[in-house]
Image: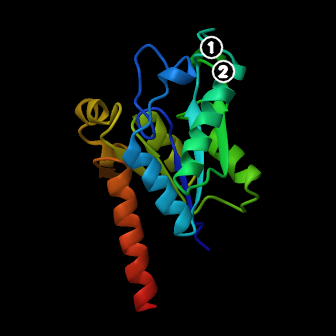
Amino acid sequence: MAQKLVILDRDGVINHDSINYVKRVEEWIPYPSSIQAIARLTKAGYRVAIATNQSGIARQYYNTDTLNQIHQRMSDIVTEAGGHLDHIAYCPHVDANECDCRKPRPGLLYQIQSALELPDLEGSWMVGDSLRDIQAGSRAGCQPVLVRTGNGNDTLRDCPDITRLVPGTLVFDDLASFVEQLLSASSKNTHTA
C-alpha cells in the first residue's frame, strides 16, 4: 500500500540556500509558502520528513549543536503554522567519505523509513532542488520531484533531459505548487473512489 509520506530536501526547498552554507540559526531563512505547504500536508494526513546533506559539519563550518538549533527553529516554525515534521535525517559527511547517507545515495531515505517503521518507501515522494536529491529518491523507490527554487533552475539548465536521466521525475515551480497538485489529485481520487 502506498505511503502518505513526503520527504523533503531542506536547503532550496524549505528555506533559502546559500553558497556559503547556512551556518547559524539567523542564516536559516524559510520560504513562507513552503512552511504553509508542509502544514497543508500534515493537515491532509501526510507524514513529512527531511533528508538533507549537511557537509558543512565535516568542513567544520558549524557543528551538530548548531545544526540541531537550526532544525529546532525549523520544527518550531512548522508547528506554529499547524504542521509537523515526523523525522529529520542528515548526512554530516563529504563525498570523499564515501558514506551510504550522502545523497545521491539513498541512505538518508532508508533512515527515515526505519525511523517511521515503514515496510518500504513505495508510493512516497522525494522533493528536492538538485540532481542528487531526485537520484536518491528514485533509488529508494520514491517518486522524484524537482522544484525550481534553490538550485532547481540551475539543475534544469545543467540537466535539460532530467526526466530521461531520472525517469518519472516531475518538475514544479516550488514546494507549494507541488503540494497543491498532490492534494488536488488526492481529493479527486477520494471523491471518485
Q: Secondary structure at mark 2?
A: helix
Give the total of numbered labels.
2
Task: Point out the residue furthest to the top here.
Answer: 60
Question: Which image quarter is the N terminus in?
Answer: bottom right
Element on which disc 1 rests = loop
Along the viewing direction, whichever of 62 and 39 lies nearer the viewer: 39
Alpha carbon of mark 1 to alpha carbon of mark 2: how far? 6 Å
Q: Residue at x 75, y 50 (%)?
A: 115
Q: Position of residue 166 (x, y in %)?
A: 39, 46
Percent coordinates x, y for residue 28 in the rendering: 49, 27
Mark 2 and mark 1 in contact (Cβ < 8 Å)?
yes
Towards the viewer: 23 or 118: 23
Residue 51 visible to the viewer:
yes
User: How many residues crowd around disc 2 within 10 Å: few (fewer than 14), some, or many (20 or more)?
Assistant: some
Of the residues shown, which amino acid type is indicated by label 2? Thr
Other residues around mark 1 within 10 Å, as few (<14) / some (14–19) / many (≥20): some
Would residue 99 be found to the left or right of residue 103 on screen?
Answer: right
- Depth check: give the residue in front, 138 or 42: 42
Q: Is residue 127 above or below residue 186?
A: above
Q: Is residue 20 left or right of residue 69?
A: left
The image's mark for residue 66 is 2
Measuring from the top left, give residue 125's x and y in whole percent. Answer: 50, 56
User: Is residue 152 positioned above or below 137 on the image?
Assistant: above
Q: In the image, what residue occupies the spot 55% across and 57% down?
A: 82
- 20 w.r.t. 40: above or below: above
Q: Which mark is residue 62?
A: 1
